[in-house]
C-alpha cells in the first residue's frame, strides 16, 4: 500500500516550493514521483498544433519526488508521517502517526 495517493493534500518539504501545500493530481507510473496541483511549475514552449489551439509559453506542473512530500493531516493541521495498520476485516488503512487518526 502506498503512503501517498491521488487526491491527497500534501505539503512539500524540500525544494523551491518548500512549505507550500497542494493536491496530488496523479502519481507517475513507477510511483517514485507525483504531480502536485499548482506546484513545481515549469515554462514550456508550445506550438500551435490546430487552428483553434493557442501557442506560446505555458506553465505546467512537473513531477515532485515522493520523498519530498508529506501528507497533510486535517486533524493535526500539520504535515504528518503516515503509518499503515491492518483492520480486523483484513483490509489496510492509513493513519497519522502523531494523532492516530485515519487519513
Image (tube, helix red, strand yellow):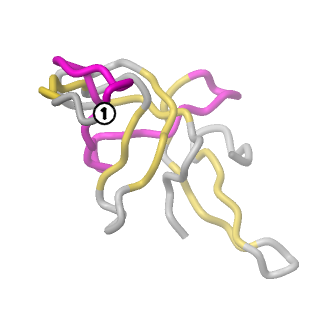
**Magenta highlight range:** 51-77
Determine the image quadrant of residue 83. bottom right
Rendered residue at 65%/51% (across/down): 95
Q: Is residue 46 left or right of residue 39?
A: left
In x, y percent, where is residue 58? 23, 20
- Against 23, residue 82 (above or below) is below
Looking at the image, which residue sits at the far right? 89
Determine the image quadrant of residue 28. bottom left
Q: Is residue 11 left or right of residue 83?
A: left
Rendered residue at 38%/24% (across/down): 52
Of the 4 image quadrants, the one containing the C terminus is top right
Q: Is residue 57 magenta?
A: yes
Instruction: Say which residue label 1 marks.
Output: 50
In x, y percent, where is residue 91? 76, 75
In x, y percent, where is residue 89? 87, 79
Determine the image quadrant of residue 32. bottom left
Looking at the image, which residue sits at the far left? 45
**Label 1 crowding class (10 Å Cα cut-off): few <14, some 14-19, many 20+?**
few
Rendered residue at 79%/81% (across/down): 90
Looking at the image, which residue sits at the far front? 51
Rendered residue at 70%/62% (across/down): 93
Amino acid at each position: 500500500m502506498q503512503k501517498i495517493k491521488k487526491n491527497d493534500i500534501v505539503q512539500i518539504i524540500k525544494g523551491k516550493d518548500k512549505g507550500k501545500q497542494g493536491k496530488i493530481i496523479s502519481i507517475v507510473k513507477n510511483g517514485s514521483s507525483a504531480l502536485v496541483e499548482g506546484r513545481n511549475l515549469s515554462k514550456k514552449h508550445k506550438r500551435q498544433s490546430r487552428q483553434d489551439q493557442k501557442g506560446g509559453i505555458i506553465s505546467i506542473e512537473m513531477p515532485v519526488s515522493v520523498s519530498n512530500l508529506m501528507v497533510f493531516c486535517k486533524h493535526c493541521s500539520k504535515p504528518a508521517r503516515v503509518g499503515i495498520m491492518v483492520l480486523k476485516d483484513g483490509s489496510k488503512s492509513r493513519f497519522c502517526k502523531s494523532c492516530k487518526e485515519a487519513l
